[in-house]
Image (cartoon, rainbow, N blue to C red):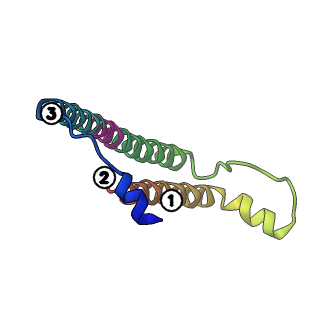
C-alpha cells in the first residue's frame, strides 16, 4: 500500500529561475522577521532599563522623604493601648522604610528575572 503511494508520486520540477525567485522571497521574509525581532528586543531592553531606573529613583525618593520627617512624628496612629499596635505605631517610620526597601529589592529581582528569562 505504501509502495503504491510512492509509485504514484510524480513531483513537478519547476525551472531554476522560479525556484530561485521563490527562495529569495522566502529568505527576504526571514530577514525582515529577524530585523523586526531585533528591533523589538531593543525596545524591550530600553523599557526594562527605564523601568528599573524609575523604580530605583522612586523608591529612593520615598525613602528620603520618610527619613526627612521629624523624628517625633508618627506616620499613622491606631489610638489604642493594645501592645502590638502600639509597637507598630511607635516604630512606623522604620516599618515603612523596611517595607520600601523590600519592595525595591523585589522590583529589582523581578526585573532581572524577567531579563534572564527572555535572555536579553
In depth, the one of 95 and 14 nearer the eye is 14
Which sits in the foreground, 79 or 21? 21
Q: Nearer the viewer, mark 3 or mark 1?
A: 3
Q: Which residue matches tag 3? A: 15
Identify residue for label 2.
Answer: 120
Magenta part of the chain:
37-46
Tell me the residue at 54%/55% (across/down).
103
Find residue 57 and name its label.
none
When the figure is inspected, residue 65 is found, relative to residue 110, above or below; the finding is above
Crowd tier of the residue under label 2, counting other residues whose Cα lies within 10 Å: few below 14, some 14–19, many 20 or above: few
Q: Main secondary structure of the magenta part?
A: helix
Q: Nearer the viewer, mark 2 or mark 3?
A: 3
What residue sits right under mark 1 in the picture? 106
Which image quadrant for residue 96?
A: bottom right
Instruction: Estimate the x, y position of residue 63 in percent, counting from the top left.
Output: 49, 49
Q: Is residue 42 left or right of residue 68?
A: left
Q: Earlier in the sequence, mark 1 or mark 2?
A: 1
- Give the CA separation, mark 2 to mark 3: 43 Å
Disc 1/disc 2 C-alpha distance (Å): 20 Å
Are there few (<14), some (14-19), or many (20+) residues within 10 Å of tag 1? few
> Label 3: how many residues lie within 10 Å, few (<14), some (14-19) or many (20+)?
few
Amino acid at each position: 500500500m505504501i509502495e503504491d503511494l510512492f509509485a504514484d508520486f510524480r513531483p513537478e520540477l519547476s525551472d531554476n529561475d522560479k525556484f530561485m525567485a521563490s527562495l529569495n522571497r522566502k529568505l527576504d521574509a526571514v530577514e525582515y522577521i529577524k530585523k523586526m525581532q531585533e528591533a523589538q528586543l531593543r525596545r524591550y531592553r530600553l523599557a526594562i532599563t527605564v523601568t528599573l531606573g524609575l523604580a530605583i529613583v522612586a523608591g529612593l525618593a520615598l525613602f528620603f522623604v520618610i527619613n526627612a520627617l521629624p523624628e517625633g512624628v508618627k506616620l499613622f496612629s491606631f489610638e489604642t493601648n493594645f501592645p502590638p499596635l502600639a509597637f507598630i505605631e511607635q516604630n512606623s517610620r522604620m516599618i515603612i522604610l523596611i517595607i520600601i526597601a523590600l519592595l525595591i529589592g523585589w522590583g529589582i529581582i523581578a526585573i532581572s528575572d524577567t531579563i534572564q528569562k527572555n535572555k536579553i
